[in-house]
Image (cartoon, rainbow, N blue to C red):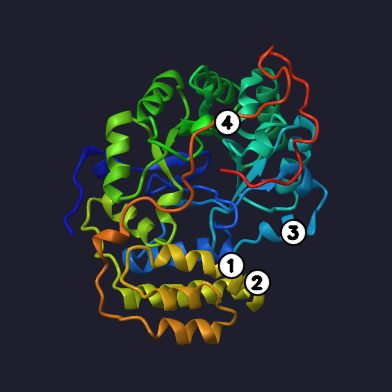
Amino acid sequence: MTAVTTESARSAALRIGPFALPSPVVLAPMAGVTNVAFRTLCRELELARMGTVSGLYVCEMVTARALYERHPVTMHMTTFAPQESPRSLQLYTVDPHYTYEAARMVVQENLADHIDMNFGCPVPKVTRRGGGAALPYKRRLFGQIVAAAVKATEGTDVPVTVKFRIGIDDEHHTHLDAGRIAAAEGAAAVALHARTASQRYSGSADWSQIARLKEHVSGIPVLGNGDIFYAEDAVRMMDETGCDGVVIGRGCLGRPWLFAELSAAFAGTPIPTPPTLGEVADIIRRHGELLSEHFGEDKGMRDIRKHVAWYLHGFPVGSDLRRALALVKTRAELDTLLSGLDADVPFPPAAEGPRGRQGSPGSVTLPEGWLDDPDDCTVPAGADAMHSGG
């Protein structure tokens, strides 16, 4: 494929605190997806195709309170591979106290090299308690939380970054205040998922709001997130918005080789040819191996099932084989079933484009009286229970 030769491709690089990233690309934390197995796979594919690992790969979100209380599942989620550097951990948090304690724990126990903070989750069970994308509306509390994480990492090389959405809905935008407050409290970078919570993952991301945030926030990098499914999308986002980097979420589901394509695009070199069905089968096998190492074979094979559906999206694979793969129980069975694929099938146009959750827009469920006072800094009750984020 041809090289991308825009200004972004020629000059792209990203610095987050002490870390200089050759490629301005960040893997978005996705619950149940970006565990150590998936991150390792993405890194391996970038290394194999480009000879280097140039972006930042963030683990799936963990809850600050659960981390501080050493919940066994949470501690397992913070697993990093020996070769991962920098190790990036995302916290979901609503409480300055637990934010500080969790961030201090990360530093003191050397659990990670970078802390990202999630204020973008639009899931109703989260927003109805004032967490996720609802929280930046409470600007004083939001500032206190960011300040707590920065204070806990003060004097160290662990930067704190913050991710959020445009706001609750079209009537309640919070991203400009959130960006300003995060920068003022010492965040090393901010990232905007260019949708409101009411959009969830539906419709189109409004990249113009990334440009507005970039104009509004100075002194730290501004990253953009939303609707990047091809390497060319990432370059175009940076050209159109002026943002300093891109955050990749659903675009890499079933396409962990996307990061090699992004690395090539920003390096101005030819983008690697997408894999054939046989090569995809080999990637699935490797993914299953890594998941089994992390979870054990039983849970690893249960986890690979959703990935297989994403991997085979758009490929001419019969319904019987798809059904069998959706019920796979062992690595040996996975290998046998994958051997039934036609290895020579090239990557089809039908396999491109969006995948993963999309859903429909809807009103955002909030705690009673949540919108009455944006300066109220009362910690939401019960919102620090473990949740999936996005």
Task: Determine the CA span between mark 2 and mark 4.
Answer: 37 Å
Tell me if mark 3 has few (under 14), some (14-19) or many (20+) residues whose alpha carbon lies within 10 angstroms of its own: few
> Which image quadrant is residue 132 in?
top right
Vertical order, 112 against 215 (above or below): below
Q: Which residue is mark 4?
A: 187
Task: Determine the CA span between mark 3 and mark 2.
Answer: 13 Å
Q: Residue at x 54, y 21 (%)?
A: 174
Of circles 4 and 1, which is in front? 1
Residue 249: x, y in percent?
46, 48
Which residue extends farthest left?
Answer: 2
Query: Does the CB distance between marks 1 and 2 fall below 8 Å?
Result: yes
Q: Which residue is mark 2?
A: 299
Q: Amino acid at mark 2?
A: Lys
Q: Give the camera-side residue of 40 and 20.
A: 40
- Secondary-structure class at tag 3: helix
Q: Which residue is mark 1?
A: 303
Task: Describe residue 97's horizontal placement relative to residue 133 as left or right.
Answer: right
Task: Determine the CA span between mark 4 and mark 1.
Answer: 34 Å
- Secondary-structure class at tag 4: loop
- Which mark sits nearer the N-terminus, 4 or 3? 3
Tell me if mark 1 has few (under 14), some (14-19) or many (20+) residues whose alpha carbon lies within 10 angstroms of its own: some
- Which mark sits nearer the N-terminus, 4 or 1? 4
- Which mark sits nearer the N-terminus, 3 or 1? 3
Residue 10 visible somewhere in the drawing: yes
Q: Amino acid at mark 4?
A: Ala
Q: Amino acid at mark 1?
A: Asp
Q: Which residue is mark 3?
A: 73
Query: Does the CB distance between marks 4 and 3 fall below 8 Å?
Result: no
Q: Amino acid at mark 3?
A: Val
Q: Residue at x 39, y 21 (%)?
A: 212
Of circles 2 and 4, which is in front? 2
Task: Determine the CA span between mark 4 and mark 3.
Answer: 28 Å
